[in-house]
Image (cartoon, rainbow, N blue to C red):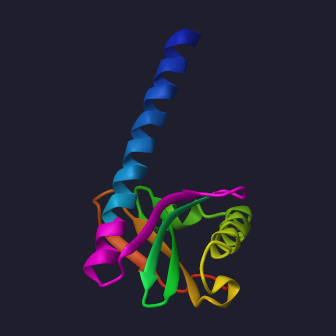
Amino acid sequence: MPEKATTCARRDRGAVSHQAGLSAELRIARDYERRGFPTARRRWRGKAGEIDLIARDGAGLIFVEVKQSRSFARAAEHLSPAQVRRLCASAEEYLGTQPRGQLTDIRFDVALVDGQGMVQVIENAFGH
């Protein structure tokens, strides 16, 4: 396959993956809202990185990392230790914008979306 065709195919796959990720994030945001956790922010970007979804839990916050793949197991495999560190650093930065700052009650959830659009949420997936 010529190099140009390979580059185009790779770009197309990347665009499809990006759209699938956006769709998964929207689905998760709607799921949290349906369960009584309104969205505070979507795709919040700080110096340390991006947080897919920040939901309100009363006066507290839920930081949600969304992972989408063919299966729940494959989606979970995409969450690396380095990404967890970036997510924690980003959450700490976001808390600096909140009235209670670091005293805000928080939790970190991981929301997995499989190839059929099924959702599995792991609440309190890791500490802070």
**The magenta segment:** 28-49
Left or right: 29 in relation to 128: left
Magenta stretch holds residue 46: yes
Residue at 46% from the left image edge and 23% from the top image edge: 9
Percent from the top left, x then y, of residue 106?
A: 58, 86
Q: Is residue 1 visible in the rendered structure shown here?
A: no
Foreground pick, 72 / 125:
125
Residue 1: % across, % down: 52, 12
Tell me the quarter of the image containing the C terminus. bottom right
Vertical arrangement, residue 73 with respect to residue 58, above or below: above
How many numbered dots are placed on residues in this image?
A: 0
Q: Is residue 128 left or right of residue 64?
A: right
Decide which of 48, 70 is in the foreground and name it. 48
Q: Name which quarter of the figure residue 17 lies in.
A: top left
40 magenta-colored? yes
- Name the residue rendered at 42%, 78% in the picture: 121
